[in-house]
Amino acid sequence: MATPIKERSKLEVRAVVRFLFSKGTKVSEIHKQIAETYGEGAMSRSRVYQWCTWFGEGRTSLGDEPKSGRRKTSTNEENTTPVDELIRCDRRMNVREIALKLEIPKRYLLMYAYPKLVENLNLFTLVEVKVSTILIEIINIMDTLTNIKYVLVERRAPLIFVMKRHAAT
């Protein structure tokens, strides 16, 4: 028995399925040949059957079909541009004000849009810290000792979100 091919792409395996299916090979035989050539984990018997069904229905594409439903990310340029424009107009705006002005949830800003913008602007990093009575003192001391500035963004017990301004290089 030959050694299985370790480096494989799913498109390559699908092409083999399509080739063997077009030659009239049975699904069980196609699966057996793929397992011998590419190893047991290359494609399951049910997936071989599914691809043979699709090819029998006239499918020619080997790639994945676009999925319907909710997008995986909402931090595309269309959604972050309005936030970016507001920040550039008035850098003193806080997350709550931006959320109110754009009529979007604050959570969206904190979790998706703001970190993406911060990454693009390269000005701040969102830092989550435990609330303590001396936290503000520590922030003030850090401001005086370093070139890094911290700005309070939101307080949500027992955590607060602090924006850490990167030092100028």
Image (cartoon, grey):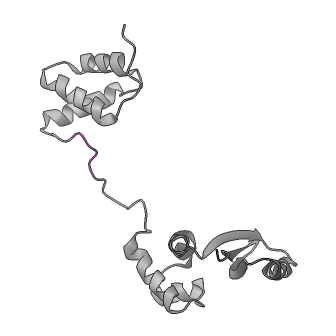
The part of the image, by quadrant, that contains residue 119 is bottom right
The image position of residue 59, as x and y in percent, is 16, 40
Nearer the observer, 40 or 138: 138
Nearer the observer, 97 or 56: 97
Q: Is residue 85 left or right of residue 44?
A: right
Q: Main secondary structure of the magenta part?
A: loop
The region drawn magenta spans 62-66
Residue at x-position 41% and y-position 75%: 79
The image position of residue 160, as x and y in percent, is 72, 75
The part of the image, by quadrant, that contains residue 148 is bottom right
Image quarter of the C terminus: bottom right
Image quarter of the N terminus: top left
The image position of residue 121, as x and y in percent, is 53, 76
Residue at x-position 84% and y-position 74%: 132
- Is residue 113 placed above or below 95 in the rendered structure? above
Q: Is residue 6 left or right of residue 62?
A: right
Label tally: 0
146 falls in the magenta region:
no
Nearer the observer, 157 or 77: 77
